[in-house]
Amino acid sequence: MKAHDGMYIDGAWRPAAGRDAIEVVNPADEQVIATVPAGTAEDVDAAVRAARAALPGWAATPPAERAARLTALRDVLVARKDEIAETVTAELGSPLAFSQAVHAGVPIAVAGSYADLAATYAFEEKVGNSTVHHEPVGVVGAITPWNYPLHQIVAKAAPALAAGCTIVLKPAEDTPLTAQLFAEAAHEAGIPAGVLNLVTGLGPVAGQALAEHPDVDLVSFTGSTAVGRRIGATAGAAVKRVALELGGKSANVILPSADLARAVNVGVANVMSNSGQTCSAWTRMLVHRDQYDEAVELAATAAAKYGDRIGPVVNAKQRARVRGYIEKGIAEGARLVAGGPEAPCEKGYFVSPTVFADVTPDMTVAQEEIFGPVLSILRYDDEDDALRIANGTVYGLAGAVWAADETEAVAFARRMDTGQVDINGGRFNPLAPFGGYKQSGVGRELGAHGLTEYLQTKSLQF
Ligand code: NAP
Ligand code: MG
């Protein structure tokens, strides 16, 4: 695959400061498809300086002009949709149809939504005898994961650009090609030099240098809880803004009145999609004891049908991690009804779509984020029991509730400690705030709520 041998800094591809490189591997066949430079603190510093220098100009650019650049960016993403999908498939391993619809499609919608918001948002408001100006926070350090490589970049870069911030992006080491494509798209869209900068590299080197850089005003991170905790602590010590999106262990609550087959089938599809590498996936299915056996049978059948139609997981380390969780589930007494820890094929980082029954709330597979195609089905006695189980993890990112009556589902959803709940299979909304309660994170992405993350207020009194 095509790759740049440099960093995108101050509007051009520049040689990296060091000589280290990252090999990009196709997880479906384990072949090296490209190499990109591994950035150092020196590259990060050059990128932050470019972002700082570009800030006054971009912050002063009228919102209508920022909106025009975002519209142009959306249009480039549309024009290069096939290339984006092929790149994501090559470095993440997701099936091409899914890459087209989701990995390329969703960022187009999100970029478009911020073109609209930049044009319409009230960056100035009157409060009594004051005028309140919503000003850009400044230089943003964006650290993104590999599971939705372009979406997670656009969900940070688009609102930051709309707000008038400048950005240094450090994408995941597993998916740098999609990030390079995004930098090309920003360039093509006429985003001025220095406004968006890209440093590819390793988390503990380039990522850490970015999170610790004194001239970064806001760090926006999506990824693991372990790294998020450290980034939060670093930002806290420096008194700088931070946004953390740290994953989840979301509950799919099927109330007794629901259409059981539909709820189970959509629930299984939700977990298997993107090979289970979705932070908001409903990895715990909660079923009433009277319907439990039927639900387990439906889920096992549905999972078996996926077979090898789901792609691999991203790398060998993740495959080992996911298989370790499956082994742990068996060891702790959960009943395997589909899949298992064995490798389904010789080449590629594949994991079988796996379903556990007889999972109890205290088991590891019911508590920890697995990040693979693994579903746990839990039994509840009544609604209060279901709520206790649903809320009984450290996470609170998403969830689902199914009932015959919407009002009944909504009443339950309102009692859940979580940031997003889909009612009877409700559709993804790119304008709805996305983010976590409890240890699923701090802050919100997407829509107007996502924009406010990149703004700070200044009040003028008259
Ligand atoms: P991760 O290490 O937290 O990766 C997220 C991003 O942070 C990557 O760009 C990573 O760079 C960077 N990073 C790593 N260490 C850093 C540090 N010390 N300072 C600053 N940045 C750093 O996550 P992972 O290792 O790829 O995945 C492990 C687990 O995290 C998964 O199994 C899953 O449970 C969870 N996860 C959650 C999400 C989510 O959407 N919430 C996404 C991905 C993973 P590198 O790419 O070089 O590591
Ligand atoms: Mg990592």
Image (cartoon, grey):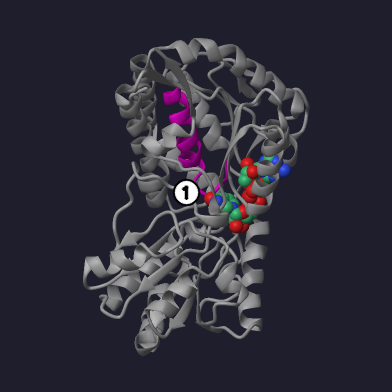
| Residue 353 image position (x, y, % from top left) | 49, 70
Q: Which residue is mark 1?
A: 435
Which amino acid, mark 1? Gly
Residue 118 picture quarter: top left
The span shown in magenta is 144-163
Q: Quadrant of the C terminus?
A: top left
Nearest to the observer: residue 92 or residue 267: 267
Q: Secondary structure at mark 1?
A: loop
| Residue 403 image position (x, y, % from top left) | 27, 72
Mark 1 lies within 8 Å of ligand 1 (Cβ measured): no
Nearest to the observer: residue 75 or residue 228: 228
Q: Is residue 194 above or below residue 279?
A: above
> Residue at 33% of width from left, 51% of height from top?
428
> Residue at 51% of width from left, 22% of height from top?
165
Asked whether the viewer can see residue 30, the reply is: no
Secondary structure predominantly adopted by residues drawn in magenta: helix
Image-based side of 47 in relation to 360, left or right: right
Q: Callout 1: few (<14), some (14-19), or many (20+) C-alpha neighbours within 10 Å?
A: many
Image-based side of 442 in relation to 405, left or right: right
Nearest to the observer: residue 86 or residue 126: 126
Asked whether the viewer can see residue 329, the reply is: yes
Nearest to the observer: residue 45 or residue 43: 45
| Residue 170 image position (x, y, % from top left) | 62, 34
The verdict on residue 157 being magenta is yes
Image-based side of 16 in relation to 92, left or right: right
> Residue at 35% of width from left, 45% of height from top?
432
